[in-house]
Each structure stands twice: as C-alpha cells, then as structure tokens.
Amino acid sequence: MGWVVMGGLSILLLLALIRFGRLPRKTWEAAAAAIVLGLVGYSLQGSPSYPAAPAQPLASNSKAAEAMILARSEMDQTFSRARPYLIASDAFARDGDYKLAAAYIRSGIRRNPQEADLWAGLGLQLMLVGEGRMSPPAQYAFDQARRLNPRQPAPDYYKGLVLLFEGRPDLCLALWQGLIENAPKEAKWKKRVEEQVAGLKSMLQQSQASAPAE
C-alpha cells in the first residue's frame, strides 16, 4: 500500500471511488484510514494496474502526525503530572522529531511511572517513530497505560487504527464501538470517535453493496 500526503479528500469521494470501481478494492483500506481519521493524510498513489508506490515516511507527513497527536491529546486527563511532558513532547513531534519526543516522555516516566497518560503518549510517539506501525515497544507502552488506567482510551483507539491500516476494518470497528459504549458522557474524544465509527460503517456498507455478486 502506497500512502502519500494529499488534501481535500472527502469521504464522499472515497465512497464514489469504491462504488464506481476507480479505487482498487485491495487498497481501499489504506485510503479508508485517512478518511475515517479525518487526516489531510494518507491516500493512494499510482495506477490500479501497477504495483502500489512505496510508503512515504511518516516523518514527512506532518499533517497526518498532527491529527494523530490531536486525537491522543483529547484522551489525556486535563490535570495530571503528565501534562507538562506531553505538551513538550507534542511540540517536538510537530517538528518531526519523534525520537526526541519519545525520549522526553521517557524522562517523565522515570519521575512519574504510574502516569497512564505518559505511557499512552509514549506509545503514540513510538508508533510515529515506526512509521505508524505497532512495534513491540509501542505495544508495551500502551499495555502499561491500560494496566495503570483501564479507562484510558488511547490503547484501544490506536490498536484499532493499526488494524485499519492493515486492512482489517471490521476489527477496528469492534474496538472503536467498545470505546464509545464505555466512554464517559463528557469525554472530549467521544464525538471524534463517533464520527469516525459512522464513517467507517458507511464505508463498509458501501463496499459490500458494490461488491460483485457471486
């Protein structure tokens, strides 16, 4: 799957491409990730008749990374000892220095090892270092966040995002629906995830409706 940054893509365009066959079915999941996330983000490059282009490094996809950071920041506790570290690390990440961002959060974890938000923030920065992949260190960080605060939504949210990138939207949908069902009513991130779930459901239904009959 080849992902490049582009702007102006809407979910209606994606649905039209799927419906009328202009977007290869084998690659629509990657574009789905961009639309459902609300990124200016990832889309596809090249012709359906040729192999997908190599992925552009996430380090150069600043708008995509910014959207991922924003989604996580909405999931942080408003007041905690983690906040100063997260604000600083997010600034490093917005400059494209994900390794420095991760290192800064690690310094916060050494002082505050029980702060779930720091572990969640580290998980995201390690995902960005790994070009959006859930590396073992990123998975460990999210697992620690979940252990310290089972209601921290970031671990399941980003696990779902990775599943979506991998072309498993049904598993992503199940995770995100579970997040919504268990979310506090006042959660800042709830509306964003609800919109993404609605878009993903619509996209899956459209894809199924346009699939050729056997």
Image (tube, grey):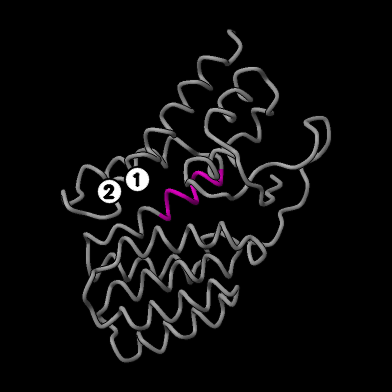
Q: Quarter of the image containing the N terminus? A: top right
Please say if 101 is above or below 49. Answer: below
Please, which residue is most extreme toward the right here? 50
User: Which mark is drawn over residue 190?
Assistant: 2
Residue 204, x across and y down, in percent: 47, 27
Please, which residue is most extreme toward the top here? 213
Please say if 99 is above or below 18. Answer: below
Kindly state the secondary structure of the residue where label 1 is placed.
helix
Which residue corresponds to the image point at 40% horizontal and 58% vertical from the top-left?
A: 71
Mark count:
2
Residue 202, x across and y down, in percent: 43, 26
Whether pointer 1 and pointer 2 mark residues with C-beta atoms closer than 8 Å, the reply is yes
Q: Amino acid at mark 2?
A: Lys
Which residue corresponds to the image point at 48% horizontal and 72% vertical from the top-left?
A: 137
- Residue at the spot of label 1: 193
Q: Residues within 10 Å of mark 1 (few under 14, many from 20)?
A: some
Q: Magenta span covers which residues?
A: 158-166
Please say if 161 is above or below 86. Answer: above
Q: Quarter of the image containing the C terminus? A: top right
Q: Residues within 10 Å of mark 2 (few under 14, many from 20)?
A: many
Which SS type dominates the magenta stretch? Answer: helix
Where, by quadrant of the figure, is residue 65 drawn? bottom right
Please say if 176 is above or below 127. Answer: above
